Each structure stands twice: as C-alpha cells, then as structure tokens.
Amino acid sequence: MKSRRQFLKLSGAGLLAAGIAPVYIPASVPMPPKKFTSKDAFEVGMAGFTFAQLNLDKMIEIMKRVGVTNLSLKEMHLPLNSTHEKIEETIGKLKSAGINVYTVGVIYMRTKESVDQAFEYAKMAGVKMIVGAPNTELLPYVEQKIKEYDFRLAIHNHGPDNPLYPNATDIWNHIKDLDPRIGICIDIGHTTRDGQNPSVDILKYKDRIYDIHIKDVDKPSKEGKTLEMGRGVIDIPGFVATLRKIKYSGKCSLEFEKDMKDPAAGIAESIGYFKGVMACR
C-alpha cells in the first residue's frame, strides 16, 4: 500500500481544484501534487443530478476544476424532448470542454412511449447505455428495445424512499431472466440507507453491475443524508477493494446531493478522497 503521505497528497488535489485550502497538509508534501493516475480498470465520473440546480456552463466549470471528465448526463441539462440539433449542440459543447458523456440518466420510464423516447434520446446523444428506472411491467418491452438498439440498461436503485427498485437484490429479481444487457447501476448511498452493504451487493451481482453512483451518508437508515465522502458510515476503502476483486471496469460517478446550489467544495473533497483511496493499494 502506498504511504499515508501519498494519500494526503492526492486527497488534497481535489480540494485545491476547487480553490479550497486543505485543513492540514504536511510541509513536506509538494504543492500542487502531480496529476492523478490510476492503475485501476474503473474510472471516476460525475452523475449529472449533482448539478441539478446549476446550469450547463457551471457544471462544466466545476468538472474542469476537479479534474473529472466522465459524465452521466441528466435531462435538466439536456431535456428528453430535445431536437437532434439541440442534442448535437450540447454534446458538442461538452466534448469541446473535454467531457465524455458515457451514459444518460437516470431516466424514468412509465409508459411505452417514454421507453421509445429514452432509447432515441440515448441514440442521438451517441451513448450505448442508459441509466434508468422503468416500471416493472414495462421490462419485457424494454428488453425488446435492448435487442433492437444493442444498448445496455443499468437500472438504478433508490433505497427505502421508493418501492421501485429499492436495492440491488430487488433489481436482480426483476432482471435475472432477461437479456444480460439489462443490469444494475448501484447507488451505494441508497444501498446503505436501505440497510444493505454495497460491497456485498456488487460481489453478489458482479456480472450485471454496469454503472455505480458513489457518495457517503451519515447513517445506515432511511433518514441518512449525503455527506462528503470519507465523513460518513460507508467503508469506501473496503468498497474500492471489492471493485478490484470483481475487476469492475466501468465508471464510479459521484452523485453529491448536498449543498446543491454551491456543491463545488463538497465535490472536490469527495473526489479527492476517493482518488486518494484509489491511490492506496
């Protein structure tokens, strides 16, 4: 495992990216730190809902400041009913800023028409995966679309607040006999709030984990609230170790649901912490 000094160095990088001085950085650690690199197969990203109260330009600004280039694009920054021209314009703007839109969502699908819309939207956006939450009765129709478009669908769990897919086991029970391109986007915060262990769940369902939303929460119950990563109850180092064990090669996208009008500091701290954990082997 790399030294504690290396961990502090990389964690501090996230704070500095947002223009925030860390509380304590030993004088022997050079500042600014070297660019973060990782030998892991998985990469860090951002879930678009983090920026729900900010416009596209502000989202781009913060992502550039914290050095994250992978984005799960949410409809508040590109409405589902956007024209092809509007989609090309928005995706082009993100690409010009060095941001890779690797998926879209979470997209809720409550009718066949909304399923059709979601798949066409994803196709025009140039992605091959949707993070979604289709009504369970629509899953046979979703499976037809998966075969038609050759996309992946990663179904997102929403914890104890929502009976529609509260946890990974519930998702698995609905999809286990469906096309294997239908899988899971596990939200580790909602998983913890539902009384489950995200490390256990990704190990159990490793072959169908297609996307991950990372965050930390202050308690393992329905009342749990988002915190900066490393301050809460989730065993992030243990989770990263399990990602390596299952050879996960997708994205771990931060969904920071705190201080949403001004999330930059919390994003920077969380990204810095997670990258620091990744650097310690």
Image (spheres, grey):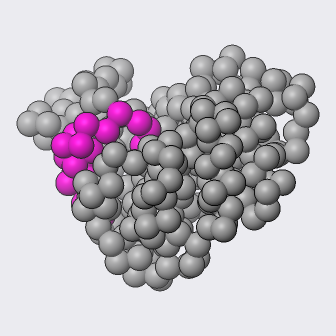
Location of the N terminus (image quadrant): top left
Magenta segment includes 243: yes
At x 79%, y 57%, the residue is 112
Q: Based on the displayed image, in which of its 4 quarters is residue 120 positioned?
A: top right
Report the front residue among 196 and 17: 196
Magenta-colored span: 234-253
Residue 217: image x %, image y %?
40, 68
Residue 35, given in percent of the width and then of the height, sits at 35, 21
Question: Is residue 171 shown left or right of residue 119?
Answer: left
Residue beneath the point at 27% across and 58% down: 204
Q: Nearer the viewer, residue 103 or 52?
A: 103
- Please state if 28 lies on the left or on the right of 261 as rendered: left
Image height of 270 relative to 234, above or below: above
**Residue drawn at (31%, 29%), measured in percent from left and top?**
41
* Along the viewing direction, whichever of 207 and 247 lies nearer the viewer: 207
Q: Is residue 125 left or right of residue 2?
A: right
Inspect this view and state whether residue 83 appears.
Answer: yes
